[in-house]
Every structure is written in C-alpha cells, then in structure tokens.
Amino acid sequence: MHQMTLAEIARGLADKKFSSEELTKVLLARISQLDPQLNSFISLTEALALEQAKAADARRANGESGALLGAPIAHKDLFCTQGIRTSCGSKMLDNFKAPYDATVVSKLAAAGAVTLGKTNMDEFAMGSANESSWYGAVKNPWNLEHVPGGSSGGSAAAVAARLLPAATATDTGGSIRQPAAFTNLTGLKPTYGRVSRWGMIAYASSLDQGGPLARTAEDCAILLQGMAGFDPNDSTSIDEPVPDYAAGLNGSLQGLRIGVPKEYFGAGLDPRIADLIQNSIKELQKLGAVIKEISLPNMQHAIPAYYVIAPAEASSNLSRFDGVRFGHRCADPKNLEDLYKRSRGEGFGAEVQRRIMVGAYALSAGYYDAYYLKAQKIRRLVKNDFMAAFNEVDIILGPTTPNPAWKLGAKNSDPVAAYLEDVYTITANLAGLPGLSMPAGFVDGLPVGVQLLAPYFQEGRLLNVAHQYQLHTDWHTRTPTGF
C-alpha cells in the first residue's frame, strides 16, 4: 500500500480494494517503524487520522467521491491545526496549540484528506537544509548522511521514504522545489496568492506561498486542487478561478516554446547536473517542444536582494514572539527588558536570530534607502526580466539547484554558501511566479531536479509539461534503498 501514489489510492478507494482506515493504519505503523531514522515528523496525530479515515469511509459508503476523500497526507508544521501543536520547528512555539485551522488545513479536511501528522522543518522556515529545527535535523532517505533540503525537508523526506503519498509544504525562496530536487519528488510553488496564507505562520509575507509535494505531477495536481482558491480571510489571496488541474494533464506539448536562460549555465553549476538538464531538454524536444535560448540579465542580483527583503519582513513578523503575547517565556525575569531579551534569546535558534538582526539592520534609519528600498527596485527588475522572457516563450526551464544534496553539517559554518544554493529558485518568489521541480536523474546516487517556471496562474501548464515528461521517463518512480 505504501508504494501507491495519490491517484492510485483514489482509484483503490473508489473500487473498494481497501478502506481509508486500513490504509491509514498501515502508514501510521510504517511511520512509527521508519521515521526514527529520518526525523521527518514533529507530531503524529494518530487519533485524528483514524477519526478522519473512518469519516471518509462513511462518506464513500454514502455515495460521495473525490480524489482526496480518504487520502492520507501530512502538513508542514507551520500550518495551524486546531488543538494540535504548531511549532514552526522552534522552541519558541513548542507549547503552542493553534485555536483554529489554517485555510489550507480546513479545505483539505473538507475534501476528506486524512492528516497523519505535522512534518519537521527549518525553524520558522529559515534554511535550505532542514538542519535549523529545534527538533533536530531531518535526514535524506536517499543517503542518511545528507540533507533533504529545506525548509520543507520533513515533508519531502516523509514522501520520498514512502511514509505517505503527499504532503503540504511552503516556499519562500525555493523551500518546496529544492527539497523536491534533493529527494526525487515533484514539488510545486503556485503563483503568489493562489493558495491562502491564512493560518500559515509567516516568515516573509510577500514571498511565502503554500503548495504540494508529491511523487508525481498528477499527485501535485490532485493536492493543489484541494488547496487552491480565493480566501476572503487573506488580503493577498487572489480571486481567480481554479481550473481542473487533473483534466489538463494530457495536453500535447507540440509547439510548446521552452526558454533556457543562458545565465543558468555559469561556473557555479555542477557540470553533471548541466548534462542531466540537457537530457531533459532533449526528452521534451521529442515530445514536440521548441527550445530557445533567452536571457535573465538581473538574475545575478537576485540573491542579495532576496536576503535583504526576506530578513526584513521576518524581523517584523517575528517581533510578536516576545514571551508576552506569544511564544516561549523565560523563567523568573528581572524586568520587562530581561523578559524580552531572554525569552527571544532562548526561544529562537541561531539562524533565526541571524536573519532577524540582518532584517532589523536593513530597516533601520539611515539604511532603509541603501538596502531595503534598493532591494525592492531589483525585485522589480527581476520581474521585468521574466515578463520580457514570457513574451517570447511559454515556460522557462533550468536546474532547480546548482549541486546535489550536501552532507549534514557541511555548510553550517558558512551560511552564505547555503544561501547561494537558492540561486535558481528565489527569482520565482521575488516575481511571484509559479515554479515546479521534477526528477531529472541522479549524481553520485543523489537525486537531481529540473525546474520549470511559467507566467502567473499557469500552474496547469507546468503540471501538464511535468506529467508528459513523467509519462516518458522513470526517474520519479525510483525508490530510496531501505524504504
């Protein structure tokens, strides 16, 4: 059962080959047995899962149907779940039980999805390796000595290890697509505003976006269908019709114009990954796609701009966690200043503290114009580059990451080296575009991803291209040894 995709589970449940309750029990037992190696879960919700599974079985018995009805999933631990710990991977929120469900959680629950638990993540989604979590690092099931990517590494590791078929995740600078690439999954960052952020604890509000992580493009289409849609509770949610993503998977790629930016193939890219990307291009050409070289001239400025904007927004968003209104409170404070200092010093880890300090500096008097305002101007230039490119091509293709997954601890002493690993993913967040990573091969036994970017609200086009590619390749079917 654990090898089935979401689509196969939906068919099995519809054909009464097994019940949601039976499937849920199998996967909960598998998580208990195998997750100690991975540390991909922060909380398991066995009682809730079995209750939801029984309810889903009852709904099917009464004639209801739906691709997600009875399907087991997990939520990244920054989606608020009523009455269940929502920690953001931080000591600061270790004792926080959300009083309500995030919109994503409530929408998927209404569709009949079964929540198995909450997955591990980089603290407050700040990281590229899932090593900054207060609950310990997550391991990559393809090689337990390597990182699974971050910040959605818990969701990625759990799905890659076949502990469950799919999971929710979030992407602020690549945190869905990079873990997908590192663990041989398909991961989709939707257009900014396509999926509600209400009840999703914020890192950088103008960049954060929730999305699906699964083994196939077809499964991502199923999960995104349940997540997407306008939400009046979220002021950044966009009132745009949600298409039937599954129905659009089988469109022909004949004549599809694919742009390949020349800036993607510079000195920082592992040449073995470059070769795999070229192989993916050839495969898509066989399916009728037309390849064109394009340019994104301001890509070189994206990383410094991102690492001003994101920490600036984080310093503002995380100010509420002070030991008074929210979060961990230190013992026996001497006065209010001591309460603030020690509560935040004890509650936040080193990476979160680093980014808060960078952000506060960038927003301070005398530096706002020099850093934050300039970064926002670069953000506009990055967006303009994409708009010009999409006048010439339908999608943009390139590597998801410059290197395969690195060893645990390898970049801990050099955070800038880890930041540079986001070079291909952060531009989509700066511009608000949808992006998808899909499996493209292996380097030294570690997975590699190819990234696709599309114009606003063209998630269906990305899923269509990825699905057609996966019909003609088998990278996405490979399973890590031991899982």
Image (spheres, rainbow, N blue to C red):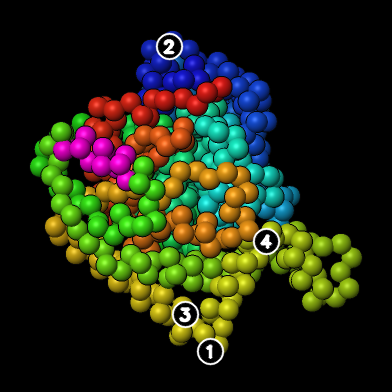
Q: Residue at x 36, y 29 (%)?
A: 475
| Image vertical order of residue 321 relative to residue 371, above or below | above
Residue at numbered disc 2: 16
For mark 3, give the secondary structure. helix
Question: Quadrant of residue 389 in the image?
Answer: bottom left
281 inside magenta stretch: yes
Image point (63%, 21%), residue name:
29
Task: Give the number of the disc on residue 160.
Answer: none
Residue 366 numbered tag: 1
- Mark 3 vs mark 2: in front: 3
Answer with left or right where residue 342 lies relative to residue 196.
right
Q: Which residue is mark 4?
A: 350
Q: Measure how far apart labels 2 and 4 are at the Cα level.
A: 50 Å
> Which region is colored magenta?
274-285
Mark 4 falls on what kind of element?
helix
Label 2, label 1: how many angstroms apart (C-alpha)?
Answer: 66 Å
Q: Residues within 10 Å of mark 4 (few under 14, many from 20)?
A: few
| Mark 1 or mark 3, earlier in chain | 1
Q: Residue at x 33, y 65 (%)?
A: 299
Q: What amino acid is labelled 3 in the image?
A: Tyr
Residue at the spot of label 3: 371
Distance CA(mark 3)–CA(mark 2) = 59 Å
Q: Is residue 47 left or right of residue 454?
A: right
- The earlier-in-sequence mark between 3 and 2 is 2
Q: Are marks 2 and 1 in contact (CB under 8 Å)?
A: no
Three-letter amino acid code of the residue under disc 4: Ala
For marks 4 and 1, give the one nearer the viewer.
4
Q: Secondary structure at mark 1?
A: loop
The x and y percentages for residue 313 are 52, 69
Q: Is residue 457 above or below residue 108?
A: below
Q: Residues at badges 1 and 3 in contact (C-beta under 8 Å)?
A: no
Distance between mark 4 and mark 1 Cα atoms? 26 Å
